[in-house]
Image (spheres, rainbow, N blue to C red):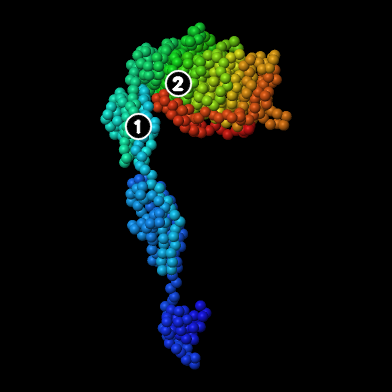
Amino acid sequence: MSKVVALLARWGKGALLASLGLIAICPVYSALAQPRIMSTPYPAMRVVEAPAITTHPASATVSQGARATFGVVATGTAPLAYRWSRNGAQVPACTQAACVIASATAADAGSYTVNVSNAAGAVTSAAAVLTVTQNIAPSITTQPASVTVNEGARATFSVVATGTAPLAYRWSRNGAQVPACTQATCVIASATAADAGSYTVNVSNTVGAVTSQVATLTVNPLNVAKSCSAADVQAALNSAPAGGSVKIPAGTCDWKDSMVALTLKGDLTVSGAGMGQTVIRRTTAVSASTSEQDKGFVLRFTCIAGSRLDISGMSLIGNDNVSGLNTDAARRDDYDSGVGLLGPCRDFKVHGMEFNEFSNSGLYLRGAAQRGVIYQNEFKSNFKCSSTDSSYPCYGYGVVVYGDGSARPLELGTAESVFVEANYFHDNRHSIASNNGSRYVFRYNDIVSSQRARNWAEIDAHGGSRGSSSWEIYNNTLTTESSSVIASSVGIRGGDGVIFDNTFFRYPYVLYLTSDTSCSGSYPVAGQSRSVHLWNNTWTTINGYDADKQPDNTRTGVNVYGSGCAQYLQQGRDWYLFKRPNYNAYPYPHPLRNGNGFQVAPPVVQKTPTYHGRPSRTPPAVSAGK
């Protein structure tokens, strides 16, 4: 730059241009000539910058007939010229920064580059590859399955198809299009007899179309009882076909000591108008001499192999608060119960029910290898004991789960259990009890203990020669009616399982552990627990309740009681304060809760339960034992 200024000062513009080689001829000046002083400034020099690519075109894959676009970003002095090439041959239509192929074909596939140039130079981009996939006609990989539902229930058909997107779906019933069904899933929210028939789906795209196999929708008729009386309900149940549905209308009916019983012919749905709407009461004592199969149930169902039962939408109220029957003398021989499920009941559902004031049990299950789910129900004041007579028969259970006496191997985290989840329990002697080779999972429940029930374990499992096989107890919240009530939490007398993530307010221990068999003789005694795992539970530390206190003043939350039982139920051998190795809880909510009729839907993992008609409550804050 200094040279340019010197030349300008000494020789003027002509000499400057000559020195830069920009003119062939320039005037000759005398060495003595004076520098020329320019009165008019010359324009600034213009520097031309060569192109540089800052963003190279990216490879793309499109289906045949789809739009394909390549783009480049370059810097440099304008104007910039763009020349795109495919496999080295120029693409005449592409002369801008973006190269657009409106409808790609196989001939458009290849390696694309772009040359960017101006007066100062040129640069070529990295290659970008265009892949053009062949359009594929639709193919059905999963055919829709036939469905049987009860009238008023939800029916769902689904298909899985492959092929070049977009795929169009057109469902038909008996050859006539179903306008509301234009997706891979066809949902009938409330099926009626008019919805029954043969369903197909046509799947199409720009290449072709395919029609599915036929799937049949069967809609079982709804039997509506004339009233909620025992006679009318019995008549409706007797006339229901296999796979049928019975509706019990709203009303309040006194069944006295009557029991409505049915041996299932196949699947059956029984529903009322809702809790507090369909109310069935009992106002007469039920004799305890009744055979075991007839223990004073309001409703008793006997399952056969392959039959499934769904019960919902009623309030059942026992005789415990009936004038003249609510004394110890009157109730001694009373054996009042709500619903009984007997036999090999599989994949049953009990939900949206209320079981109150029964002297024996609200819900009683007994049979071989039962499995199903009990959810969003309320169990209140099912209690029968005497505070003064030790010989008095003592009952009162929200839920009773009995096996058939068969030995069952320890099998945790599977569907092979009775699941009791998201229910509310209050003032029951035991919220749940088990025996006789049973398995249960008790989770996400809300329990409130009362003054009269405080000395009995809310969550119970018997032992003995054929006691409970297994139990899984987790994510429950237990509290008491008031700060003056200190209650008993989990009482295990046999069987093995897991107890974790529970919260106990005003319960001094997590677990009361003992044996139904006398703790004497050779180890182990019959039916005793040998694999109990507890972890991540929270409970109340209460002065005077020190059975779990260790020499270093830490707490285990486990009270091992019973004469000599401490030698038979030892920490590190029979019970442990850590997660059971390789244990995984079964999905919550239970898949049956989300099913189409009795079909099982994929489980939905949910951490916080939604209680039926009752929000989850937060008990008063207390100090935590762990």
Which residue is farthest front?
88
Locate residue 550, reporting x and y percent.
70, 29
Q: Nearer the viewer, residue 408 or 224?
A: 408
Q: Is residue 49 above or below residue 132?
A: below
What residue is shown at x 41% (from left), y 14% (from top)? 264
Label 1–label 2 contact, CB within 8 A: no
| Quarter holding residue 219 | top left
Q: Nearer the viewer, mark 1 or mark 2?
A: 1
Q: In this view, does 334 lie above or below 208?
A: above
Q: Quadrant of the C terminus?
A: top right
Q: What element carries label 1?
A: strand
Locate residue 128, reporting x and y percent.
43, 53
What residue is shown at x 59% (from left), y 10% (from top)? 391
Q: Is mark 2 on a helix, strand or loop?
A: strand
What residue is shown at x 62% (from left), y 23% (from top)? 531
Disc number placed over residue 348 in the picture, else none: 2
Please name the amino acid that badge 2 sits on.
Phe
Locate residue 614, reporting x and y percent.
46, 29
Q: Is residue 323 above or below residue 377?
A: above
| In-image side of 355 versus 138 (left or right) | right
| In-image side of 517 versus 46 (left or right) | right
